[in-house]
Amino acid sequence: MIDHTTRSHSILSPSGAHRWLACTPSALLEQQFPDTTSGAAKEGTLAHELAELKLRHYFFTTDFGKRKFNAAVKKLKENELWQDEMDGYTEEYLDYIKTAALSAAVPPYAVIEKRVDLSAYIPHLEGEEPASGTVDCSLIGGEILHVIDFKYGKSPDGRVSAERNPQLSLYALGIYEAFRIFYRIERVKLTIVQPRLPDGISEWETSIEELLAFGEYVKERAALAIKGEGEFHPDGKTCRYCRAKGRCRARAEENVRLAFSPDFGKPPALIDNADLGRYLTQGTDVAKWLGDLQDAALAECLAGQEVPGWKAVEGRGSREWTDMDEAFGKLTRTGIAPEEMLWERRPLTLAQVEKLVGKKDFQECVGEYVIKKPGKPALVAESDKRPAITNRVSAAEAFGKKEEK
């Protein structure tokens, strides 16, 4: 089993390919800044480890039987980030792969957590390890290479599409190079399984010829990126996870242009819908950029550096008990009834109850008492997969209301 916490990331890593393919100079630029790991990323790493155990137990039961599997899972549960819901979400990932394997025309060979060499497409600096990537799962057989990637993110903004996904495409190239002497591969299928989202499965299929053409494109872009050459291409998607995003001059100049230099002539007193859409599109990254600037400036001030016109101050503090039990005991002794004054009895939220009892048991036991109310309307880009809604009343709804009278 791979130690997911020690996965190495080269300068031109597959996970960052969407960035350095579009904005080639950013790869070397961001090396000046530390690479940090968030709590969500650590939680995702733990979920990946559980997912790997389940795949190994399913495909290689002889070598990784029930006793070894249960012992390994028990060890994972000792991690402070463990959540029981991880079991259900990784089961959905396993179910998808089981279905894909069982429905294949030819029983496929399963490749689990394999590190693939990408040096045929991505160069590396002297002293750096050759470019590589770790593929969550691949199924090979019947002239089809199926690459499946597990994502544990739960934010709709973090939804990942498999269509022309550069990370998965690089993984597919790595698997192809490793197994092409054993298998004749004609088609390539890419899948993202993101079980914490309601429609978190994304699939895309292409030919091996198109994948290899992408590989040639990668070679050209990577040759520029490894030398820090090419043109900067700042935008919301490219800059989102770039470590240099708060100090990048190209991004700063582009956002100033978008915010203060509209590209159309003298407008009328009121903006129309076309202008509304254009301003929203132009300003998408401006607010995020200002936030990143503030983070960078605060870090400088806290480090004792001067940022003209700005300084770091202590924010509004908060109070907390040093010993709540002792404090409440003293208040009780003064005559305050704890059950009336010091404690509130509130039910857990629906989501908290589901998390407590488990998704499957929750549905079987009390699912009939749950209804899903529509969420508050939100404005998103047209590319978002969710269906559009309006406040217009349909003819059927209008007539239905009349008939009820």
Image (cartoon, grey):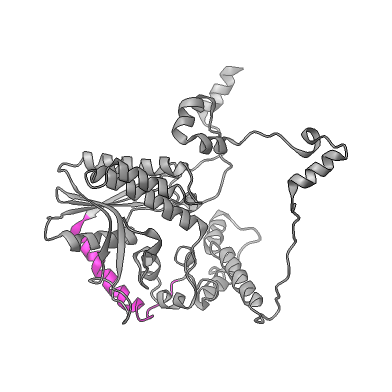
Foreground of the two, 272 or 344: 344
Provide the residue span drawn in magenta. Answer: 207-233
Is 310 situated left or right of 353 in this image?
A: right
What residue is shown at x 56% (from left), y 18% (from top)?
Answer: 403
What residue is shown at x 30% (from left), y 46% (from top)?
Answer: 55
Position of the N terminus, as image quadrant, is bottom left
Q: Main secondary structure of the magenta part?
A: helix
Position of the C terminus, as image quadrant, is top right
Quarter of the figure with residue 165: bottom left
Foreground of the two, 333 or 167: 333
Q: Position of residue 5 (x, y in %)?
A: 41, 61
Q: Is residue 266 visible?
A: no
What residue is shown at x 60% (from left), y 69% (from top)?
Answer: 295
Instruction: In the rendered view, tell whether residue 146 sits above or below residue 198.
Output: below
Q: Position of residue 109 (x, y in %)?
A: 18, 49
Q: Is residue 80 visible?
A: yes
Number of numbered discs present?
0
Any magenta on residue 222? yes
Foreground of the two, 243 or 255: 243
Q: Position of residue 44 (x, y in %)?
A: 44, 53
Instruction: In the rendered view, tell whether residue 226 sits above or below residue 72.
Output: below
Instruction: In the rendered view, tell whether residue 127 sits above or below residue 86.
Output: below
